[in-house]
Amino acid sequence: MKAFYEVISGPAGAPRDWGRDRTLYLPDIRFVETSADRSGNTTAHVMTHQEFVDAANAGMVKNGFFESEIHRVTKTFGNITHILSSYEMRAKADGPVFGRGVNSLQIYWDGKRYWIASVMWDDERDGKCDSC
């Protein structure tokens, strides 16, 4: 989890280490960004790793982006682990929090290391975040 948050975090102008990021995941990982509009209509945007990088990189590098874990719930059965990881987002490492949410990760133990198999997240809305 430490590497998961480290690779996307950094100050404005600093490139992200997407090569390191790729080493965390099973091939063909899918990222699912969930959201809701003001009317409560929900959507799920499914992306490959490269689609996520293409969508997120420019804003992270231009504005600075730091995401840090503030709470974690972990459940394991056999080689499968599910992690609910609550996070805070900042533009600067010591700056004000501009958002919070929850990452849901499915990870796989191959006998030697963990691999992230899928990532789904939702940002807090209307001051409500039951797991934050």
Image (cartoon, rainbow, N blue to C red):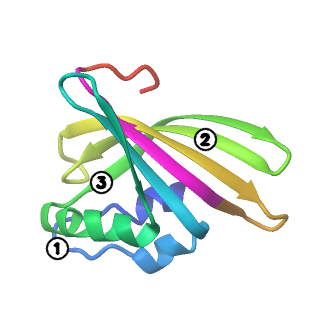
Q: Earlier in the sequence, mark 2 or mark 3?
A: 3
Circle 3/circle 1 CB separation < 8 Å:
no
Q: Is residue 73 above or below residue 47?
A: above
Is 63 on the left-hand or right-hand side of 115? left
Marker disc for residue 66: 3
The residue under label 1 is which amino acid type?
Gly
Which part of the image, by quadrant, shows the C terminus? top left
Please rate how many residues cluster around mark 2, counting C-alpha atoms within 10 Å: few if below 14, some from 14 to 19, many from 20: some
Q: Earlier in the sequence, mark 3 or mark 1?
A: 1
- Report helix, strand or loop for mark 1: loop
Q: Residue at x 42, y 61 (%)?
A: 6
Part of the protein shown in magenta: 116-126
Marker disc for residue 13: 1
Magenta stretch containing residue 112, yes or no?
A: no
Q: Is residue 42 above or below residue 46?
A: above
Q: Residue at x 18, y 63 (%)?
A: 59
Q: Earlier in the sequence, mark 1 or mark 2?
A: 1
Circle 2/circle 3 CB separation < 8 Å:
no
Q: Residue at x 21, y 31 (%)?
A: 37
Q: Quadrant of residue 76?
A: top right
Magenta stretch containing residue 118, yes or no?
A: yes
Q: Residue at x 27, y 76 (%)?
A: 15
The residue under label 2 is which amino acid type?
Ile
- Choose between 19 and 36: the one closer to the eye: 36
- Report helix, strand or loop for mark 3: strand
The residue under label 3 is which amino acid type?
Phe
Please rate how many residues cluster around mark 1, counting C-alpha atoms within 10 Å: few if below 14, some from 14 to 19, many from 20: few
Marker disc for residue 83: 2
Q: Is residue 86 above or below residue 127?
A: below
Indicate the position of residue 98 as horizontal and vertical percent values: 19, 39
